[in-house]
């Protein structure tokens, strides 16, 4: 058994009439990279703020990095790094001074804080920016500095609240490259929130979906997709009659067979094997287009809540 780094039981937080987080149970093991997904207002940041001791729960309990959030918040803070969703107002400080100051705040000597800053600057590709004022950094540069600040005290567990929001695709990729490399080198446990479903899909070993204050799913992205959505074969026939024939032919290999106009959609276990077999079975049907559609995490969210995460986001 690997060690549990986060253990939350019934963690709840209300703000007056708003039930932001309702009974969060969570176990995260050492070395895991867990992503928290959910629409705006789902309760992700509130959960992170409780786990990082920035916000007191209304009820429930949690142990983070072996320390109780209620009785030993200082112990939690010493062992974790936290990169919040918003970053503070612009600073007049130089980048390097900001890092040294953070090291000092964690109790490092001036010399040790300088050494640590000198390690982190290249690790997050900030060396060329060391003497720049923080307020002059671009969004992506600032986010890399935020991550560096969260790593100053070599935490074993890092919380990242939307680390990549607002960054262009290249800066996002660049930030992830740094974070994943640090993780590989140091075996750090990472718990993050993101609105980029593909990020969660490709990087996280585990995905938690939160909706209206509750965790509605917790598994690997692949298992969530096959459990809640599955693969679909989608075939556009030349006619409605053709689509109906395809639906009849796919028969028992599929569940949820639908025909809309000239398009037949069927949920199957193994799309790449089913699709050619299906087309061979009805050679008389003219086919305009055919594809295997693999589920996305957005499909999972839709299946779980009846709403699309992308639409919820847009709203
Ligand atoms: N300090 C506060 N006072 C009052 N309500 C709050 C406070 N903080 C959060 N809330 C409310 O709690 C709910 C959950 O907010 P939270 O910030 O946790 O959502 P989130 O999942 O992080 O959303 P986003 O994706 O927009 O960051 C929301 O309805 C929010 O308005
Ligand atoms: Mg948030």
Image (cartoon, helix red, strand yellow):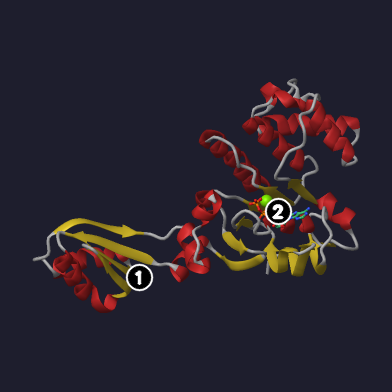
Q: State the image quarter where residue 18 is shown.
A: bottom right
Q: Secondary structure at mark 2?
A: helix
Query: Relative to 286, is 77 on the left or the right?
Result: right
Q: Is residue 276 above or below residue 128?
A: below
Q: Residues within 10 Å of mark 1 (few under 14, many from 20)?
A: some
> Can residue 115 be seen by looking at this rendering?
no
Q: State the image quarter where residue 268 is shown.
A: bottom left
Looking at the rendering, in which quadrant would you find the N terminus?
bottom right
- Say which residue appears at 51% left-offset and 37% top-offset: 169
Query: Residue lying furthest left in this view?
Result: 284
- Say which residue appears at 67% left-offset and 56% top-offset: 44
- Say which residue appears at 83% left-offset and 31% top-offset: 100
Label 1 with label 2: CB-CB less than 8 Å? no
Which residue bears the numbered disc 1?
269
> Can residue 104 be seen by looking at this rendering?
yes
The picture places residue 60, in percent across and down from the top left corner, at: 80, 70
Query: Residue lying furthest bottom in this view?
Result: 252
Q: Secondary structure at mark 1?
A: loop
Ligand 1 is found in the corner quadrant, namely bottom right
The picture places residue 233, in percent across and down from the top left corner, at: 29, 63
Disc 2 C-beta below 8 A from ligand 2: yes
């Amino acid at each position: 058994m690997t060690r549990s780094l986060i253990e939350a039981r019934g963690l709840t937080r209300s703000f007056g009439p708003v039930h932001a987080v309702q009974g969060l149970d969570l176990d995260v093991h050492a070395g895991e990279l867990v992503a928290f997904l959910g629409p705006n207002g789902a309760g992700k940041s509130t959960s992170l703020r409780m786990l990082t001791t920035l916000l007191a729960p209304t009820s429930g309990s949690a142990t983070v990095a072996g320390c109780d959030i209620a009785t030993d918040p200082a112990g939690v803070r010493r062992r974790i790094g936290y990169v919040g969703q918003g970053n503070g107002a612009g600073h007049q400080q130089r980048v390097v001074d900001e890092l040294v100051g953070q090291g000092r705040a964690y109790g490092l000597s001036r010399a040790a804080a300088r050494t640590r800053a000198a390690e982190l600057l290249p690790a997050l590709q900030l060396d060329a920016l060391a003497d720049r004022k923080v307020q002059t950094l671009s969004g992506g540069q600032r986010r890399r500095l935020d991550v560096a600040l969260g790593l100053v005290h070599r935490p074993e567990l890092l919380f990242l609240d939307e680390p990549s929001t607002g960054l262009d695709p290249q800066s996002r990729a660049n930030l992830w490259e740094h974070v994943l490399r640090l993780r590989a080198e140091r075996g750090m446990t990472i718990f993050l929130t993101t609105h980029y479903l593909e990020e969660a899909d490709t990087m996280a070993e585990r995905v938690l979906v939160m909706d209206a204050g509750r965790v509605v799913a917790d598994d690997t992205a692949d298992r969530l997709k096959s459990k809640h959505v599955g693969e679909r074969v989608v075939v556009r026939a030349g006619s409605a009659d053709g689509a109906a024939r395809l639906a009849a032919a796919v028969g028992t290999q599929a569940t949820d067979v639908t025909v809309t106009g000239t398009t037949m959609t069927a949920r199957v276990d193994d799309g790449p094997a089913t699709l050619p077999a299906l087309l061979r079975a009805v050679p008389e049907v003219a086919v305009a287009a055919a594809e295997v559609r693999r589920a996305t995490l957005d499909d999972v969210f839709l299946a779980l809540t009846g709403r699309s995460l992308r639409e919820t986001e847009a709203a």
